[in-house]
Each structure stands twice: as C-alpha cells, then as structure tokens.
C-alpha cells in the first residue's frame, strides 16, 4: 500500500485517463467509509447518548467534573467536539507537511483512518457513567477523521482535471451520503426493534456506534488499494529526507508561502466562518432535537436518514448548477438558504416531528452541495506540489478550526439553559461567511495560484 506512481504527467496527474478514473472510483470510497462515522456517531447517536451518560454521572446540580472542572452535563458533548478540534489543529499541519515532503500520503491515510475506526469501535464499551471514556474516544476519533481528510482531500487535484473537479468532488460527497443513508436504515431497524432482538436500548445504541467503526475500517481498504502516491521532485535534498524531524519547520515554511497567495487565504477565511456554522449544525442537531424539541431517537434517526437521501440529490444537483452558474455563486446561494433554515429552526414547535422533517429536508438539499463545491473550489487555489500542506489548512477550516461554533453553542446553553438561544447564535457564521466569500475574486485567485482557470468557477 506504499507504492509510488511514476506514470503521472509533470503536473502530478495520472497520464492514463483509465487509470485516473480508476483512482477516482477508489477515492469516492473513502467518503463511503468515513461518512458513516459523521452520520451515525456524531450526528445521531453519540450526542444524546453521551449526554445521558454524563447526566447519570452528574451531581445534584447537573454538573460533571472532568479534571475537576465543573461542566453542565448538557454541554459536555459540545465541549468534547471543541477539544477534539484542538487536538486536530496540532496534528493536521504536521501530517500535511510530512505527506507533501515524502510524497507518501497513503500510509498516513491508513494510520489516521484505522486509529479513528478503532476509537469508534471502542465506543461499544461506553456504558453506565463512563462519560470520560466517551469523551476520550470522541476526541481521538474526531481528530483522526480530520487528519485523514487532509490526506484524502489532497488527492483531488491529482486525480481530477480542473474542469471535472466539481463533479468528482460532488460524487465523493454523494457516495458518503449514500453510505450514511444505508447504515442509518440498518441502525433504525436495530434501534426501533431492539426489544425483539433481545437488546436493551443502550446496548442497541452501543452496537450502532461500534458498527460505524467497523464499517469505516472495512471500506477504507478500497481507496488504499486504488490510490497511488506520486513521486515528488524536490531540490535541496531527497524527497522525505528528515521529514519527521523538520515537520514543524516545513509547516512554518508553508504558512509563509500561503502569505504569497492572499486570495487563497481570503477564501479560507470565508470558508472558516461559514463552515463553522455548518459543522455545528451537523454535530448539535440531534441534541437540539432530543433535548429542546423532545423528539424520540427514532424520529431523529429518520430525520437524519432523510437528510442523507436528499443530500445525495443535493450534492449532484448543485454540482450541475455549478457548471451553469459557477461554484462561487452556487455556494453563496446555499449560504442564504442555511440562514433561512436556522431562522426556521429557532421557531420549531416542540413535539412536532413533521416540522422537524421539513427542516431536515431543507438541510439535506443544501448540505452536500455547499461542502462538495467548497472543496472543489479550493482545489483550484492550491499551488502544485503543495496539495497536502494546503489542504491541512483547509481541513483546519473544515474541522480543525470549527471549534468556535460548538463552543459558542455550548456556552449559550450553559448560560441560558435554552438550546433555542444556542441554535440562533449560529446565524452570524453564515452571514459573515457570505459577505467574505462574495468579496473573493476567485478567477484571479486561481490564476495567482498558477493554475488554469476553468470556464465556469
């Protein structure tokens, strides 16, 4: 799994179109593998379940005390997500620098993926009052996912020509949402029929959590077999020489280099802001539905399943829209819709599944497209030969620096005791992100990065 491809063109693309398509099909399967974690674990089961475990361990005032710090049990999950992101911030730039310096992304991808899959599988043992175990496993799994996505995303400029990246990226997201929907159907059958299977409700949840880790690990084998590492031409030393020891030195060089591309940094800033809102909605939706709206777990699973199904159509549909209107305009339209969705969510009545389903449908239609097009748009802004390093910065925006949203969400609940106040606070992320993205001249940014400018962007 560590072979290096020597048949690529000078720009790093595979010379044979058939080989490039084969790699693209393998690349799609990492979304297929890891998206189950994002869906079943983060979005559906772990938030409400870890909250219930923390409440079981809480004192009379409703607080737990990890490391002696008083934390309201209802805020623990949001704080754990933020902590996982801090860990990812420390790891992702180093991994990205090492990957570009050595040219071997695949062994690093395998290590990150299987660390995350193992931590997720270990969530089977989260029972009773083991909220500290749950917090630790969440931090490890979330950070591992973020590191793996740096390496996964860095393949996109190498396996897809500029004019096909919107479509390839959108298909990857569609594969991910397809797997999320499939596994959620199985989760729904197990959870809703746990009595007939002779399982307690808690045991059914723990099986669903662990199965996501097994799925992640199993389907990661496909991209590891099909993706190829590229040989890197370096001056001033052999590729990989002193890679680990000089990782942070390389990171500093990367940050200095990024200052030479201020338009790329402008896009990253905009993406940092609006994606912080997206990631927080994804991670906190189930907690909002269960704790504020009083919806049962079956309703939440069904709603997230609806998101997954419609996100497939949304990702592919917005990919087609980008070919007509350009990726930037399509993303801006999605941000306007996100703002409207949050405003509607604030006024959702408690105990009304129908309105929650309608909101889930709207989220599904914009979720996949806004993420897929952001990834493909950024791939045009990356200088050649620096894909993993630049995508480490992108991933810090995608997951690594999305700590502010969960932190604000958790603090809002801790201070007010209302999840409605927490959810409405996220509107600011989409509004500010819209304004910043609208100001980025993307065609000039692509040209400044030294890449060919697509006809529509």
Image: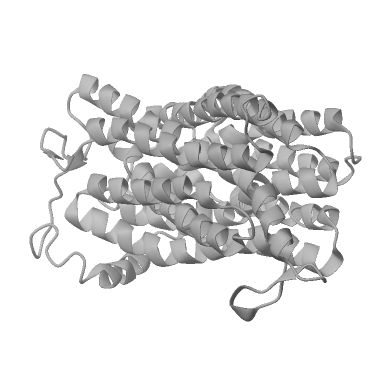
Position of 250 compared to 203: left or right?
left
- The x and y percentages for residue 403 are 59, 62
Query: What is the total number of numbered labels drawn onto the structure image?
Result: 0
Q: Residue at x 72, y 41 (%)?
A: 338
Look at the image and tell me whether residue 452 can be seen.
Answer: no
- The x and y percentages for residue 219 are 37, 32
Q: Residue at x 85, y 27 (%)?
A: 354
Q: Quadrant of the N terminus?
A: top left
* Colouring style: one colour
Q: Residue at x 73, y 37 (%)?
A: 297
Residue 94 sits above or below residue 306 on the image: below
Most foreground residue, 35 or 387: 35
Most foreground residue, 93 or 305: 305
Residue 82: quadrant of the picture = bottom right
Most foreground residue, 331 or 219: 219
* Farthest residue, direction top: 18
- The x and y percentages for residue 349 are 91, 40
């Amino acid at each position: 799994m560590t072979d290096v491809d020597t048949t690529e063109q000078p720009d790093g693309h595979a010379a044979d179109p058939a080989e490039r398509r084969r790699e693209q099909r393998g690349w799609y399967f990492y979304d297929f593998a890891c998206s189950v974690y994002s869906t079943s674990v983060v979005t559906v089961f772990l938030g409400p379940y870890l909250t219930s475990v923390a409440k079981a361990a809480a004192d009379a005032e409703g607080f737990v005390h990890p490391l002696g710090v008083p934390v309201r049990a209802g805020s623990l999950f949001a704080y754990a997500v933020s902590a996982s992101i801090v860990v990812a911030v420390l790891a992702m730039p180093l991994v990205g620098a090492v990957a570009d310096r050595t040219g071997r992304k695949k062994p690093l991808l395998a290590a990150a993926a299987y660390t995350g899959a193992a931590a997720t599988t270990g969530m089977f043992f989260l029972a009773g009052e083991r909220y500290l175990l749950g917090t630790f496993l969440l931090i490890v799994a979330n950070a591992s996912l973020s590191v793996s996505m740096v390496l996964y995303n860095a393949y996109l400029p190498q396996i897809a020509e500029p004019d096909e990246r919107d479509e390839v990226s959108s298909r990857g997201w569609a594969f991910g949402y397809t797997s999320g929907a499939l596994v959620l159907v199985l989760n729904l059958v197990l959870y809703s029929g746990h009595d007939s299977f002779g399982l307690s409700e808690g045991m059914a949840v723990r099986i669903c959590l662990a199965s996501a880790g097994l799925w992640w690990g199993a389907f990661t084998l496909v991209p590891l077999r099909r993706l190829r590492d590229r040989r890197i031409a370096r001056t001033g030393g052999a590729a990989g020489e002193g890679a680990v020891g000089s990782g942070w030195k390389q990171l500093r060089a990367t940050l200095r280099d990024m200052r030479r591309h201020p338009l790329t940094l402008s896009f990253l800033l905009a993406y940092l802001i609006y994606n912080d809102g997206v990631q927080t909605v994804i991670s906190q939706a189930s907690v909002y539905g269960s704790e504020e709206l009083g919806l049962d777990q079956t309703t939440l699973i069904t709603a997230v399943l609806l998101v997954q199904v419609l996100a497939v159509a949304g990702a592919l549909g917005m990919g087609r829209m980008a070919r007509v209107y350009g990726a930037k305009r399509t993303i801006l339209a999605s941000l306007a819709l996100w703002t409207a969705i949050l405003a509607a969510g604030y006024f959702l009545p408690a105990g009304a599944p129908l309105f929650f389903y309608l909101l889930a449908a709207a989220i599904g239609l914009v979720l996949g497209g806004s993420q897929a097009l952001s990834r493909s748009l950024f791939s045009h802004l990356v200088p050649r030969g620096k894909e993993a390093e630049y995508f480490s910065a992108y991933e810090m925006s995608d997951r690594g620096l999305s700590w502010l949203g969960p932190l604000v969400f958790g603090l809002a609940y801790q201070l007010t005791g209302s999840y409605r106040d927490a959810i409405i606070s996220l509107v600011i992320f989409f509004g500010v992100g819209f304004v910043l993205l609208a100001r980025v001249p993307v065609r000039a940014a692509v040209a400044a990065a030294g890449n060919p400018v697509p006809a529509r962007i």
